[in-house]
């Protein structure tokens, strides 16, 4: 087949066949299709979209571009969760050990930051020595011995997606629903899971800005998973403010450890995490209430599972910080951001805030950028909160002086706004 002709056809809005998508997935994974052609094809997909059949064909082709993790011999429910990406979204680090403490096996093949959003692997690598690079045999052993694992794609697991994922991040094609769908589902279906819960984010800080687009993505991913014999459900959650009280890598790990310790976590993070946990457990035929989840955290078992996983993957676990005021990452600058006038927080420019934090080093602007894990935000103000010139909007931790005023990302009103639940449907 001729790659250039396929690019032209997709550029002009024509549908490609299953065989052509297999050729593309194979060519990208084996580097027979160079990056510049792959990037052109991704942009054509971004601009023209894919039909439902094309999305399914691409997903299957990506899945078949490599090997799959074999967990059939483990006679326990195997369930994972995936988020479409949000600012401050750290639920995976809490969910894996919390759900795993109920006897459910949680194999998470996770990713890095994409665009303005943070990545699970980047957060975990805040802990010295932690390695997400495990062989498929090691992934299986982690599930057998520890019940949970958070690993990167191996070279042989969905190699087409691994290459396309990196190119999407730097070619302006991140927000494409078909590409998001095929990327997520190909990786997740390669894990050997029985069930999958999707956290589809909606709002300014998400890739999906409208409920219509979010539902379309959720429906497409559910349809693909169910057609391949998996239990798949989706929850639509709001991303019009950062999730939790921290944004960054090191600081988000500490917030998760505090949550697993039962010490402190914000109400929105807890509500979203518990909704996802209940759904993951439901797919494993376990009914659990919020009280059951509280009780499980109180036992200390989920925290112990997380720390054991980190050690087993070569990392030095952080000691939980039980008082949020004691969370001071190792940066040169620590500055509180205050408002110019009193009022109620009625809006947060979540996307812009995350982009500026990435420019300070918390994320990547190019594939070659090295993340400064310690850069981040703590004490993030929440929608509906009352602030004055003595109540900070957030605390910024960075190594260079920002050239923007982070207070400009927060909108105030004279009256208290109604703040809806972070769970949409």
Image (cartoon, helix red, strand yellow):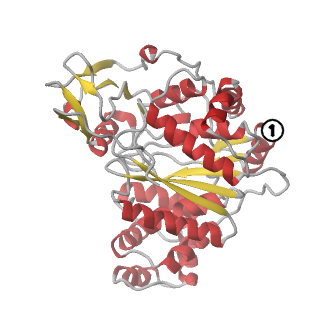
Around disc 1, counting alpha carbons within 10 Å, would you say few (fewer than 14), some (14 to 19), or many (20 or more)?
few
> Who is closer to the viewer here, 136 or 93?
93
Q: Secondary structure at mark 1?
A: helix
Q: Residue at x 43, y 33 (%)?
A: 244
Q: Which residue is mark 1?
A: 145
In the image: residue 44, left or right of residue 186 = left
Q: Position of residue 99 (x, y in %)?
A: 67, 41
Taking 287 as reference, is 251 above or below it?
above
Taking 284 as reference, is 360 above or below it?
above
Q: Residue at x 37, y 70 (%)?
A: 40
Q: Which image quadrant is residue 41 in?
A: bottom left
In the image: residue 122, left or right of residue 277 = left
Name the residue at the left extreme: 341
Q: Position of residue 180 (x, y in %)?
A: 47, 62
In the image: residue 277, left or right of residue 399 = right
Taking 208 as reference, is 260 above or below it?
above
Q: Residue at x 57, y 26 (%)?
A: 257
Q: Position of residue 258 (x, y in %)?
A: 54, 24
> Who is closer to the viewer here, 87 or 167?
87
- For the question of whether residue 121 can be seen, the reply is no
Q: Position of residue 102 (x, y in %)?
A: 74, 39
Q: Which image quadrant is residue 146 in?
A: top right
Q: Residue at x 58, y 22 (%)?
A: 318
In the image: residue 79, left or right of residue 339 = right
- For the question of whether residue 141 can be seen, the reply is yes
């Amino acid at each position: 087949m001729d790659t250039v002709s396929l690019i032209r056809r997709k550029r002009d809005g024509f549908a490609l066949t299953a065989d052509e998508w297999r050729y593309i997935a194979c060519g990208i994974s084996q580097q027979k299709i160079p990056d510049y052609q792959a990037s052109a094809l991704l942009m054509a997909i971004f601009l023209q979209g894919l039909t439902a059949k094309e999305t399914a064909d691409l997903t299957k082709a990506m899945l078949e571009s490599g090997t799959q993790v074999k967990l059939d011999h483990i006679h326990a429910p195997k369930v994972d969760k995936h988020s479409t990406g949000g600012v401050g979204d750290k639920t995976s680090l809490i969910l894996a050990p919390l759900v795993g403490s109920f006897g459910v096996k949680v194999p998470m093949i996770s990713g890095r930051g994409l665009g303005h959003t943070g990545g699970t692997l980047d957060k975990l690598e805040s802990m010295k020595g932690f390695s997400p690079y495990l062989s498929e045999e090691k992934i299986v052993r982690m599930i057998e011995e520890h019940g949970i694992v958070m690993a990167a794609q191996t070279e042989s697991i969905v190699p087409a997606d691994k290459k396309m994922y990196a190119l999407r991040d730097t070619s302006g094609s991140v927000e494409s629903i078909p590409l998001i769908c095929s990327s997520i589902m190909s990786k997740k279906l390669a894990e050997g899971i029985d069930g999958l819960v999707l956290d589809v984010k909606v709002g300014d800080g998400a890739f999906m800005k409208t409920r219509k687009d979010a539902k379309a993505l959720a429906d497409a991913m559910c349809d693909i998973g169910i057609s391949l014999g998996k239990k798949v459900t989706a929850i639509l959650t709001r991303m019009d403010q950062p999730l939790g009280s921290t944004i960054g890598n090191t600081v988000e790990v500490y917030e998760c450890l505090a949550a697993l310790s039962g010490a402190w976590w914000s109400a929105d993070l807890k509500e979203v995490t518990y909704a996802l946990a209940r759904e993951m457990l439901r797919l494993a035929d376990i009914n659990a209430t919020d009280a059951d989840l509280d009780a499980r955290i109180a036992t200390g078992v989920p925290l112990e599972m997380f720390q054991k996983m980190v050690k087993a993957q070569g990392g030095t676990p952080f000691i939980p910080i039980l008082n949020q005021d004691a969370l001071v990452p190792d940066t040169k600058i620590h500055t509180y951001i205050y408002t110019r006038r009193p009022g109620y927080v009625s809006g947060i420019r979540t996307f812009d805030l995350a982009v500026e934090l990435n420019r300070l080093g918390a994320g990547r602007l190019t594939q070659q950028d090295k993340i400064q894990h310690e850069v981040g935000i703590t004490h993030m103000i929440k929608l509906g909160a009352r602030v004055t010139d003595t109540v900070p909007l957030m605390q910024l931790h960075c190594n260079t002086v920002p050239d923007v005023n982070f207070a400009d990302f927060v909108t105030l009103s004279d009256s208290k706004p109604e703040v809806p639940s972070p769970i949409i449907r």
